[in-house]
Image: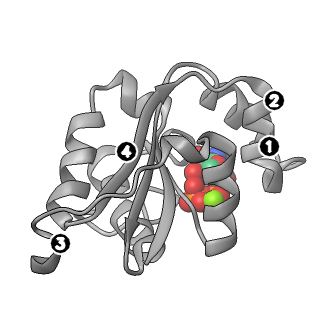
C-alpha cells in the first residue's frame, strides 16, 4: 500500500476544478486520507520545488504556486503514485493523453492544474512537507474489497 501527495494548483482552485478532480480520484477507487486548502508561502514553495532551483521557469513557478490557495491531498492505495501520475497526464498538457486531467483541463505547462509526486521518495518528502502525521487518517471503507 502506497501514499502519494497530490495538489490542485492555484489555477485549478481559481477555476473551480477541485470538485471534478476529487470526483475523478474517488470514482477511480483511490482513498483520500488527508485533504486541506492551504496558502503556500515562498519558503514552502522553494522546499517543495527544490529540484527545479536555477531552471528558467523557477521564479514563475514559485510566483504561481504561491499566488492563491492550493488543495492539498494525500491519496492511498496500491501503486497509487504511478496511477495518480497517469491520471494527471504529461507535464505539458499538449502532450498529455486525452482523458487525463492535464489534457482535459489545461493548455500550458506553467498552468497545468495539478501536482503529483513522481516517486516513493518524493511522495514521502512531499507528504511530510505539507501534512503533520496526525492529519493523515487511517480508515477502512466498506467498498475496499470491491476495488
Ligand atoms: P511535474 O509537475 O509533471 O512533475 P516537473 O518537471 O516536476 O513536472 O515540473 C514541476 C512544474 O513546473 C510543472 O508541473 C510545471 O507547472 C512547471 N514546469 C515544468 N517545466 C516547465 C517549463 O518548461 N516551463 C514552464 N513551467 C514548467
Ligand atoms: Mg515533478
Label 3 C-beta lies within 8 Å of the nearest ligand 1 atom: no
23 horizontally vs 76: left or right: left
Structural distance between the alpha carbons of marks 3 and 2: 38 Å
Residue found 39% across the figure and 71% down from its top? 86
Residue 119 vs residue 3, the one in the foreground: 3
Instruction: State which tag comes first along the sequence, 3 or 4.
Output: 4
Which disc, if any, is residue 106? 4
Q: Can you give x and y, in whole percent of width and height, for residue 49 in the image?
A: 74, 47
Numbered disc 1: secondary structure? helix
Numbered disc 2: secondary structure? helix
Which disc, if any, is residue 47? 1
Structural distance between the alpha carbons of marks 3 and 4: 32 Å
| Quarter assignment of residue 35 | top left
139 horizontally vs 91: left or right: left
Mark 1 and mark 4 in contact? Answer it, CB < 8 Å. no
Structural distance between the alpha carbons of marks 4 and 2: 27 Å
Mark 2: few/some/many CA within 10 Å (<14, 14-19, 20+): few
Q: Work out which quarter of the rendered image holds the N terminus and state it.
A: bottom left
Residue designated by label 3: 144
**Given this view, does label 3 or label 2 mark the residue nearer the observer?**
3
Mark 3: few/some/many CA within 10 Å (<14, 14-19, 20+): few
Structural distance between the alpha carbons of marks 1 and 4: 25 Å
54 shown above or below 38: below
Mark 4: few/some/many CA within 10 Å (<14, 14-19, 20+): many
Q: Work out which quarter of the rendered image holds the C terminus and state it.
A: bottom left
Label 4 C-beta lies within 8 Å of the nearest ligand 1 atom: no
Instruction: State which tag comes first along the sequence, 3 or 2.
Output: 2
Mark 2 and mark 1 in contact? Answer it, CB < 8 Å. yes
Numbered disc 4: secondary structure? loop
Mark 1: few/some/many CA within 10 Å (<14, 14-19, 20+): some
Residue designated by label 2: 43
Amino acid at each position: 500500500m502506497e501514499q502519494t501527495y497530490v495538489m490542485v494548483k492555484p489555477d485549478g482552485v481559481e477555476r473551480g476544478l477541485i470538485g471534478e478532480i476529487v470526483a475523478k480520484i474517488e470514482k477511480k477507487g483511490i482513498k483520500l486520507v488527508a485533504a486541506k486548502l492551504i496558502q503556500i508561502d515562498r519558503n514552502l514553495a522553494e522546499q517543495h520545488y527544490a529540484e527545479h532551483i536555477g531552471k528558467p521557469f523557477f521564479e514563475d513557478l514559485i510566483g504561481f504556486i504561491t499566488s492563491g490557495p492550493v488543495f492539498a491531498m494525500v491519496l492511498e492505495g496500491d501503486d497509487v503514485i504511478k496511477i495518480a501520475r497517469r491520471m494527471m497526464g504529461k507535464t505539458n498538457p499538449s502532450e498529455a493523453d486525452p482523458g487525463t486531467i492535464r489534457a482535459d483541463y489545461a493548455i500550458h505547462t506553467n498552468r497545468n492544474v495539478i501536482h503529483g509526486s513522481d516517486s516513493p521518495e518524493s511522495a514521502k518528502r512531499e507528504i511530510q512537507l505539507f501534512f503533520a502525521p496526525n492529519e493523515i487518517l487511517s480508515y477502512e471503507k466498506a467498498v475496499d474489497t470491491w476495488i
